[in-house]
Image (cartoon, helix red, strand yellow):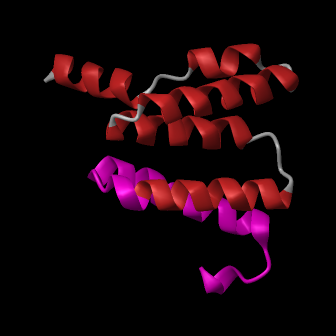
Amino acid sequence: MTWLSGHLFEKTEPTRHFAIHALRQGNLDQALTLALQALALREEARFKPFLPLDHLLLRDIYLAKGDMANAQFHTKIASAIAEEMGLKMLVSSMPSIRDILAAQQKGA
């Protein structure tokens, strides 16, 4: 992502969206790499409002990989940040990738 050199916040969203795309395509390793990059960029840019969503994306990737420990870890972090910002319901209202896949299978 050298085309956005030096603009941390501006680099975050494309990186996060590429991670989401990789997750949807089933490329879990690429999704994880990109999601971790997006989280690091967001933290470095010090833009806190979207941090819970970055951690929820990581939760979904770890769930898809079958890594419950890391999924729970990122859920806890997302919850703590959201609660700190007064957004307690944010994390509990966000469906996980498992919820979405189950709904898709049910509808098929």
Q: In the picture, which quadrant includes the C terminus?
A: top left
Horizontal and vertical percent for residue 101?
A: 28, 28
Q: In the picture, which quadrant includes the N terminus?
A: bottom right
Q: Residue at x 55, y 23 (%)?
A: 94
Q: Residue at x 34, y 41 (%)?
A: 65
Residue 6 covered by magenta stretch: yes
Does residue 36 sit above or below 7 in this rendering? above
Q: How many numbered dots are placed on residues in this image? A: 0
Dominant secondary structure, magenta: helix
| Residue nearest the observer in this picture, 55 or 101 | 55
Location of residue 35 (image quadrant): bottom right
Horizontal and vertical percent for residue 72?
A: 54, 26
Q: Furthest-left residue in view?
A: 108
Left of 59 or right of it: where is 53?
right
| Residue nearest the observer in this picture, 91 or 70 | 70
Does residue 42 sit above or below 89 in this rendering? below
Horizontal and vertical percent for residue 78?
A: 68, 30
Left of 99 or right of it: where is 78?
right
Horizontal and vertical percent for residue 68?
A: 43, 28
Residue 89 covered by magenta stretch: no
Left of 48 or right of it: where is 95?
left
Does residue 24 sit above or below 94 in this rendering? below
Highlighted range, magenta: 1-30
Q: Residue at x 86, y 24 (%)?
A: 84
Q: Residue at x 58, y 55 (%)?
A: 36
